[in-house]
Image (cartoon, rainbow, N blue to C red):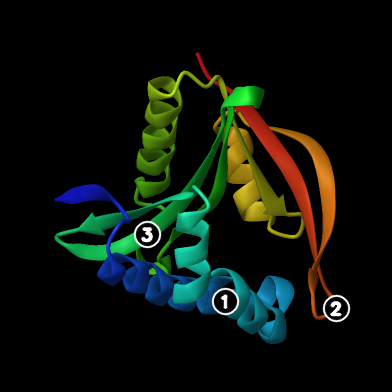
Amino acid sequence: MRSIKQVTEQRDIHAVAELANEIWNEYFVYIIGQPQVDYMLRHFQSVPAITAQLESGQEYYLLKIDSKPVAYMSLISDSPKDKMMISKIYVKQAIRGSGLGNYLLDFVKHQCKKKQLHSIWLTVNRNNQSTIDWYLRRGFKVTGEIKKDIGAGYIMDDFTMEMAIG
């Protein structure tokens, strides 16, 4: 059985950080290299970083199958711009391709409608072609580029993508 739970408790924050460590090390090393993965995990996906993000208004969610965490995401609502950002959406390698990404995207759409927002946007590394293709197949369009210095000499080199929802 699958369920999505909003992250509000310390044990959930730890579960997200553990998932991040596993997923980022299995997926992103070939795209951005181990040193940048280590840096980003430490600065953006550690327990203190996730806690600070929650305190700033980001919403984190854990997707569990049979009570085991298998994916997570973070959403940022922007009512003045009528948009919701998928800040993070990551699924364990062993279950990618099983429809969970669609399940999570449907959840995001539901959250948008609940908050009366009319589009979803995100950033994706320009070298992450399989993910770019996944979003394109679901109706997202590439809307721009962002190059952002994230410290220690690392640059996030991303496309922005967006999809209107009814």
Visible in this render: residue 37? Answer: yes
Question: Which mark, by number, is residue 41?
Answer: 1
Visible in this render: residue 46? Answer: no
Question: Which mark, by number, is residue 71?
Answer: 3
Marks 1 and 2, the one that precedes in the sequence? 1
Callout 1: 10 Å neighbours few (<14), some, many (20+)? some
Callout 3: 10 Å neighbours few (<14), some, many (20+)? many
In terms of depth relative to the viewer, which is nearer, 93 or 118? 118
Q: Amino acid at mark 2?
A: Gly
Q: CA distance from mark 2 to mark 3?
A: 29 Å
Dot 3 falls on a residue whose secondary structure is strand
In terms of depth relative to the viewer, which is nearer, 94 or 22? 22
Marks 2 and 3, the one that precedes in the sequence? 3
Left or right: 65, with 13 as reference point: left
Return the x and y of residue 87 as percentages of the image width and height. Answer: 57, 50
Please identify the residue farthest to the top as the structure is shown: 166
**Residue at image coords 52%, 58%:** 53
Question: Which mark, by number, is residue 153?
Answer: 2
Residue 29, image quadrant = bottom right
